[in-house]
Image (tube, rainbow, N blue to C red):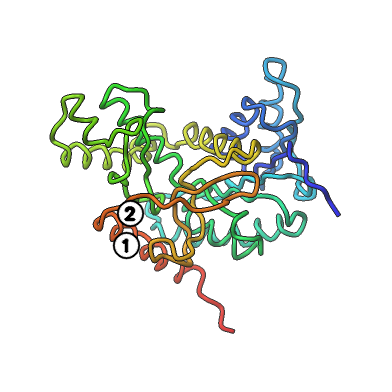
Amino acid sequence: MIILNSRKAAVIGCGFVGSASAFALMQSHLFSELVLIDADRNKAEGEALDISHGLPFAKPMQIYAGDYQDIADASVIIVTAGAGQKPGETRLDLVKKNVGIFKSVIPAIAKVNKDAILLIVANPVDILTYAAAQLSGYPSNRVFGSGTVLDTARLKYLLGEHLEVDSRSIHAFIIGEHGDSEIAAWSSANVSGIPLHNFCEMRGYFDHEEQTKRIAEDVKNSAYEIIEKKRATYYGIAMSVCRICEAIVQNQKSILPVSYIQKDNYGISDVALSMPAIVGSNGVEGSVPIELNEEETAALKRSAATLKAILDDVLPKQED
């Protein structure tokens, strides 16, 4: 029996997101050992060397390229492997391509390690989280995605800029799909316990509907804007990965909007999407109900239906 090393993690996929996540994890001091795996072994070796050369400025740590056998005792396995969307390619084409990649990656992980936490970061994260749970055979609490953790950070950042307050004092969530059908849960948003609309008025803003709509759209379009300007987004998601790992390794029981398989949550089941959850050393340890109005609840159900339609296309249910 292999005993997991709580100070060891693995990153599967060393593209922009995987390598930035590895760099952020090195700086976090959460782990003492980090294995990098990529289909291109040279790429993994190059990233490991590049990051390792900065260790004299950080803390002692082993960072190296490896293969699946090297992750048998890793406690957290971060999966960023996947293809990017090409010009002229539909979203569904990308989904099918990345589910195909997962059909080889996830069973390879499960073959050597059945007890780790699988953190899915590759996109579309909700579909791939569901696929990973199905392909791995892991308990659903130990397979979850980065979800809308970054979208929520973007929301807090933009609200902080708008209201001229520390974004860490803002409590608000983006829920649902990490994508075009995501929802800003304005009903439960507050600034240090003060309802958001009340706080806005304290700061001299009264046109709530127009302002919240604009900010929600800006959050939704943030990735598109960054990709247009620099072709990829990776620093923000790398810091999100780091934050989630912190909650796991330190058993913080933090409330984060990760993507996990819903079980009759607001009437939604059998689909992975983002809702606030308690995250600790056992993974997703419980869902956290937040106040949603009728419009937000309906939008959440539409988001779930959008994801289910894609799942039915790429992961048809097996007949008994």
Side of 33 relative to 191 (left or right): right
Q: Few, some or many C-alpha atoms within 10 Å of disc 1 (few <14, some 14-19, many ≥20)? A: some
Residues under labels 2 and 1: Cα distance?
Answer: 8 Å
**Numbered label tally:** 2
Q: Nearer the viewer, mark 2 or mark 1?
A: 1
The quadrant where residue 57 appears: top right
Question: Residue 55: percent from the left, percent from the top?
Answer: 71, 20
Q: Are marks 2 and 1 in contact (CB under 8 Å)?
A: yes
Which of the labelled discs sits on residue 200, or is there none?
none
Q: In the rendered structure, which disc, 2 or 1, sits on the residue that comes first in sequence?
A: 2
Query: Quick one: 77 or 261, which is closer to the camera?
Result: 261
Question: Residue 117: percent from the left, percent from the top?
Answer: 65, 49
Q: Which residue is mark 1?
A: 302
Side of 194 relative to 17 (left or right): left
| Figure quadrant of the C terminus | bottom right
Q: Which residue is mark 2?
A: 181
Query: Quick one: 294 or 66, which is closer to the camera?
Result: 294
Name the amino acid type tagged 2.
Ser
At numbered mark 2, what does the secondary structure look like: helix, strand or loop? loop
Q: Residue at x 61, y 29 (%)?
A: 23
| Figure quadrant of the N terminus | bottom right
Question: Residue 183: percent from the left, percent from the top?
Answer: 32, 50
User: Seen from this angle, which residue lies furthest right?
Assistant: 1
Question: Residue 186: percent from the left, percent from the top?
Answer: 28, 44
User: Seen from this angle, which residue lies furthest left?
Assistant: 207
Query: Quick one: 261 or 71, which is closer to the camera?
Result: 261
